[in-house]
Every structure is written in C-alpha cells, then in structure tokens.
Amino acid sequence: MNQHVVNVIMMLAACGAFLVGFKFLSDNMEKLFGNSLKKLFNKTSDKKWVGVGMGAVSTAVVQSSGVTTVMVVGFVNAGIMSLYQAATVIMGANIGTTITAQLAAFSSFDIAPIFISLLFVGVMMEMLSKSDKIKSIGLAIAGLGLVFFGLEIMSDAMSSYKESKAVLDLLGSMKNPFLLLAFGIIFTALLQSSSAVTTIIIAMAAQGLLIGGGGNAVLFIILGSNIGSCVTALISSIGTSVNARRASMIHLIFNITGAILFAIMLLIWQDKVVGSNFYEVTFVKWFKEPTTQIAMFHTFFNVICTLLFLPFTKILVKVSQLIIRDKKQSEKEPWELVYMDKRFLATPSVALGQLKKETFRMADMSMDSLRTAFGGFISRDMGAVEKVYEVNENIAKLGEQISDYLVRTSASGLSFSDEKEVSALHSNIGDIARISELADNVTKYTKREVKDNLVFSEGINEKLAAMHEKLHEQYALVKRIVLDNEKALVPESDGLEDEIDAMRRALVAEHIERLSKGKCRPENNTIFVNLVCNLERIGDHLNFIVHSLDSDK
C-alpha cells in the first residue's frame, strides 16, 4: 500500500484514538465528580467571577466547552439561569477548554511515554477492581493514556513529512489569514470539537510542520476553531425558548468578537507591517517548544477575551436581545417539565439533580391536591372534587415524563450511587402518585358526605385538621432532607410519622367508643375510618420517600 495512504490512515486512526480517549476521560470524570458538578450548578450566582469559575471548573471536569455550553442553554431554557449568569459561565467555559491544548502540549516532552503507560495501568484498575469508583478512576486514567497514545501515533505518522520539501512548501504557502480563519471555523464545525483541531495543529508543530512556515499564520486557525466551537450550542438551541437561543447567541458573539479583535492585532503586528510578528516576539521567545507556544496562545487568547468582555456582560445580553426579539411565549402546562431539559442528558449527574427537582414539584402538586381535597371534605365543598381530578390528571402526566427521562438518564451511563438514586426516584414517583390517589379518595368521601348528609361529632373536624397539618409538616421536612441533603432531620421526620400513626389509632379508638355509646351515627363509620386511615397512609408514603435510598443499600 502507498506510504502516503498508510500515513493518512494512521493519522485518522490516531485522531480517533485521541477523541475516544477524551470521551473515556470526560465520561468517567463526570461520574467521579458529577455530584460536585450538580451542587456547583445549583449555586448559580449573579457575581461575575463566580460564573466564570463555574464555567471553567465544569469544563475542566467534562473536558468539553460544548457540553458546558449546551448545559447552560438547557438551564436558560428551563428558566433556572438568567442570561447574565449564562454569559459569565460561557466565558469561563472558554477558559476551561484550554486544558485540552495544555495536555496535548505534553506530547512533545520526554514524559509522554509515562502518560501513555497510564493506558495499561487504567485498564488493569478497571479489570481487577470490584469498586465502581476505582473502575471509573481506572477508565479516566486509561482515557488520559489513550489521549497521549493517539498523539504519539499522530506525531509518528507526520514525522515522515518533516523532510519532504513538497509538504513543507505546501504548508509554507498557506499564509492567507482569512482562508486560515475560515479553515479553523469549518474544520471545527465539522468535527464539533475545537479540542481535536487544536490537538492536530499541536501534533503537526511537534514534528516541525508549521502552517504558513511560521509567524502568525497558525494562530488564525486557533481563532477560527474558537468560532467553530459555537456550532454545538447553536444546534442545541434550535426549538428552545427565546432566552435559550440568546444564550447560544452570546456564546457566538463573544467568540466572534474576540477572534476579530485578535485577528486585527495579528494582521497589524506582522513582518510586512511593523517588521516583526506577534507570535515570534512573544510566545516563541517565552516558550521553547512549538507545542507549548500554541497551547499557551490558546489559553492567553481565552483569558484575555474574558478579562476584556466580562465588564461588558450586560451589553452582551442587550445585544443578544436586540438580535433575537421577544415573542409571545405560550405558558407551560402544569404537567410539562420545568427543571429538566433534554440537553442535560449529556451530563447525567446534572440531569439527575434536575429530575429530583421535578419529582418534588410533582410532590408539591400532590400535597396541594390533598389540601384541596381535605378542605373540600371539611367545608362540604363539591367544587373541590373537580379541582382535585384536574390536578391529579396533571400529576399522572408529569410522572410519566419524569419516569421516561429517568430511563433515558440511566441509559446515558451513571455511577453506582447515581443508579441507586434513579431507582429511588422511580420509587418516589410511585409514592407521590399514591398520595394523589389518596387525595382523590378523600373527594369520594366528600361526595358521600354531601349525598347522605352525614354529620360528624363535635370537635372531630378540628382533630382531623390537626392530623392533616401534621402531614404537611412532615412533607416540609421530607423536602429539606432529600433536596437539601439535611440528613440530620430524618429522626424528626420519623417522629412526626409516629405521631400521625398515634393520632390515627387514637381517632379510631375514640370513634369506636362513641359508636358503642350511641354518640355517633353508624353510617359515619366507613367514611370516618377510611379517611383517617388514608391520611395515615400518606404519612407512610412520605416516610418511604425519605428512606428510599436506604432501602437500596
């Protein structure tokens, strides 16, 4: 086979190995630090540097600015994050993504074989360990090793061309800055990974294959790759809310404006204009290795752009609002998802956190349904029956959607602890649905109460109301325990559940005593006992929610 064909195949295979390595690294880093990432995004802030830090850290964890930006679009689409917050996180994501180039730059140092050996170490850890955490660490290490393995093969395949005059002349002739900028945009848009483009450029530099023969030329490709990286978020924003599309537009405006400013500087600061070029005066002098020079420029560009544009975040938001005008938005139906967005599936741990919020929104609806049903029973209001029926229909539809997304999240690849949480949430949905069904039972008792003109003994309604309020107290604790992870409140919640059980026993015992003394009408018996038992069962279901994770251990 022709040697040139072999080299091309090897370079493509090496690029594939590199991307697979980063996929392993990204997926398993997300598994290892997913819960931390989930907590990070739960702490959205209006402080600029907090947003930048969030974007940088999350991108460093998932190893993809595209994934972070898509998550941001999802948060904005769900109404959880403001455009101002999104803009700062996007700027941070651009800084975080530069770690890829910094890792790739190590390929030119003698320590590269050490990193490649991590491939074997990581695979052995995954094969020999029984711990899911150790397996994830092993696969992340193996992914890092595979990244360097791909770079090494890529460099070897390119090494045969460093003495080729035809190849060097071809690369040297590629000096048109506008074509190079366009090449960076298109190539990145096709691969949907600025990391891959930057890595290929670095691998070429490691073998002395310099585009444009040196000078500023190679930097225009790096600038173009930053613009091309916006494609992922733009595609993701199709069909989303106006603000979600504005978030992706902010990403595009930020990257395009930064690239244009730097491109103008590079066009002015070149040999033909001022007698020297920016690249050789700065990074070539500051750093010895060409690979480090390119990686450091990539970092420098993104940090400087963030420093330049951060004070003008509000202006970026205003510009995005001028470009994408407001449209009349139809209000969401109660059964439609509020916190969850399909874009979160790219980061399963974050998706799981959002689904937990949706589950408790469903629980809020069920407890509201109970309050409406109970209020209707006490006031003998038949209008409550239809209200409860309508709310319960929405609860059922919402439960179906949450369950569907739980299945899809589970299929996205989760750690063992996250899988347990998925199982717990499936169980929680069942308990919440049962609460809404018990609320519906109360409306049936209201119908019977009104139809048969039943009258209960004096003071009974007040005791029933006290039991009902205890359930809402218990639910408030359940939310804090599960959503805010306040495990110290579990005994207090259990204590309330015990109180509710005791209230049920006392009410039934008092009722039987009244029946035996003829103080209570016999036809009240079925309604009263069933109502009290249904309220007590709601307390049981709330307790099941608190202990659902414990039951999976």
Image: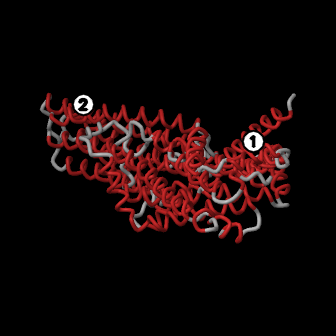
Write down the quadrant of residue 422 in the picture. top right
Which mark, by number, is residue 444?
2
Category of crowding for the residue at label 1, using alpha-carbon neighbours closer than 10 angstroms: few (below 14), some (14–19), many (at least 20): many
Relative to 327, is 400 above or below?
above
Q: Nearer the viewer, residue 228 or 373?
A: 228
Q: Position of residue 107 (x, y in %)?
A: 78, 56
Task: Label 2, secondary structure: give it.
Answer: helix
Task: Label 1, secondary structure: give it.
Answer: helix
433 sits to left or right of 12: left
Write down the quadrant of residue 11 in the picture. top right
500 sits to left or right of 183: left
Q: Position of residue 97 (x, y in %)?
A: 59, 55
Position of the N terminus, as image quadrant, is top right
- Residue located at (82% from left, 52% from top): 116
Tag 1: amino acid: Ala
Q: Nearer the viewer, residue 457 or 425?
A: 425
Measured in 3D between alpha carbons, the distance from the residue under mark 1 to the one under mark 2, in whole angstroms, is 64 Å
- Residue located at (45% from left, 60% from top): 88
| Residue at mark 1 | 17
Category of crowding for the residue at label 2, using alpha-carbon neighbours closer than 10 angstroms: few (below 14), some (14–19), many (at least 20): some
Tag 2: amino acid: Lys
Q: Position of residue 535 (x, y in %)?
A: 33, 43
Any part of residue 403 in sight: yes
Pointer 1 with pointer 2, Cβ within 8 A = no
390 sits to left or right of 195: left
Any part of residue 551 in sight: no
- Closer to the chain start, of discs 1 and 2, is 1
Which mark, by number, is residue 239?
none
Colouring chosen for the image of the structure: secondary structure
Relative to 161, is 453 above or below?
above
Q: Position of residue 209 (x, y in %)?
A: 76, 51
